[in-house]
Image: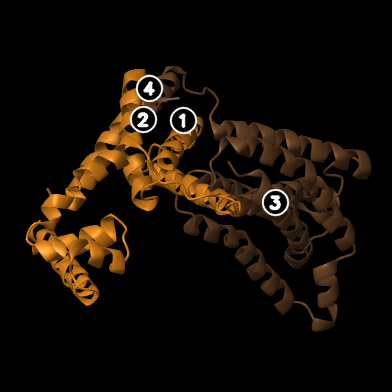
Amino acid sequence: MRTDDLISTMAETPWPRLSPALRLAIAMLGGWLVALLGMVLVLGPPLAALPATGLLPFAVKTGFTAALTALSVFAVIAAGRPGQRLVARLMLIGGPFLFLAALAGLEMSSTPSEAWRGLFLGSTSATCISAIILASIPVLISVLWAYRAYAPTRPAVAGLLAGTSSGAAAAFAYALYCPETTASFLLVSYTPGIAVAAVAGALLGGRLLRW
Amino acid sequence: MKQQDKADLLEAKLHALMLASIAGRSGAYQTLLRLCAERLRAYFGRRLIGRDEDVEDLVQETLMALHNKRATYDQSLPYTAWLHGIARYRLIDFLRRDKRQLEVPIDDAFEPADTDAFEALLAEIDLDALLTGLTPNQVAAIRLTRIDGYSVREAAEISGQSEPAIKVNVHRGLGRLIAAIKGSDDAN
């Protein structure tokens, strides 16, 4: 086909209605609801632990995971738009972790060092890590599917950010159940699940997000 | 016009065309794609010298990518940055695929290029004009050994020059030819 004919053909097709960002948001919400449904089936109704933990720890957990989700979604969208600068957005993702680390430092300074183990691991660490990893699977699948509308010039980096978004969204769902109260626990037990999702996203993204 | 001003002007035009395209004006979109095709042809052409077919394939592939991914353009950012990002990605992808194609079969024969362009170029080379300025003995020695393909001994018999004289005349004649060609290059 001659290049001019190709151009004429393309110029006649209408502009897409659904923006990639909207498509991504819808897909992500869908995957997240599946993850939440899984948690309801396995762990029971959400928010049951809220009276025991109090509002402030709940706010820290949901705030941390919601902020991490939002920042990594913004970064993954930027990674899918050629010509966008990524570095600042990547560094912003570190923000919620720094905030948690500061809180954890406060907790440690007010706790005798023999009790630090309990501070970090709580009693539900294993449940937390596996719940986040499992819950991130439907989110990651739907995010990667919707992300094909984007044009990542570094597919593995985009995959890493897609995985981080999925892990963070899964952690947000789990935060509705989590009976722990410390920021130290969040730092030590939420991070591994999110990291596993991020690495899975990077490995899958390097293959699936080429275009 | 300065290089930077030129780039700014191009950016302003492309950006305006893209905004018009998003607003649904297909004429603007067609103009935009034509301009992009020109830019891409130059961009790929500089990197794949002498591979015009590959360049044109790559231009078309990239135009399709620009079209299929048009919704990923952020209107607050330079259009040229977006265009360059996509072109670069397609080029890297092409080179990656190309590396495998470079495995050439063993029985791949070297075919002389018999295209029209090659013929035309050949026809332009005027042997007689090149050989003027040499002595008759040098012309004869070069013609017999280098163009007609005789051996030094045969050339000596045909021309009546001695064998050492043939060798000297070929050597000096070619030396003057090369000097003459270099001289005309410098003049250009």
Task: Of the two numbered discs 4 and 2 on the same chain, state the one appearing first in sequence.
Answer: 4
For this view, does B57 lie left or right of residue A124? left
Determine the colour of chain B: orange
Q: Residue at x 63, y 44 (%)?
A: A209
Chain letter of mark 3 equals: A
Q: Which mark is residue B180?
A: none
Q: CA distance from mark 3 to mark 4?
A: 35 Å
Q: Which mark is residue A201?
A: 3
Task: Of the two numbered discs 1 and 4 on the same chain, state the one appearing first in sequence.
Answer: 4
Q: Secondary structure at mark 2?
A: helix
* Residue on which the image places disc 4: B23
Report the mark closest to the observer, 4 or 2: 2
Query: Is A19 drawn above or below residue A178 in the view shown?
Result: above
Query: Is A35 drawn above or below residue A104 in the view shown?
Result: above
CB contact under 8 Å: marks 2 and 1: yes
Estimate how packed mark 3 is, as few (under 14), some (14 to 19) or many (20 or more) residues with alpha carbons within 10 Å.
many
Residue type highlighted by circle 2? Leu
Report the mark closest to the observer, 1 or 3: 1
Estimate how packed mark 2 is, as few (under 14), some (14 to 19) or many (20 or more) residues with alpha carbons within 10 Å.
many
* Residue on which the image places disc 1: B67
Residue type highlighted by circle 3? Gly
Task: Of the two numbered discs 2 and 1 on the same chain, state the one appearing first in sequence.
Answer: 2
For this view, does A58 lie left or right of residue B7? right
Query: Is A175 drawn above or below residue A186 in the view shown?
Result: above
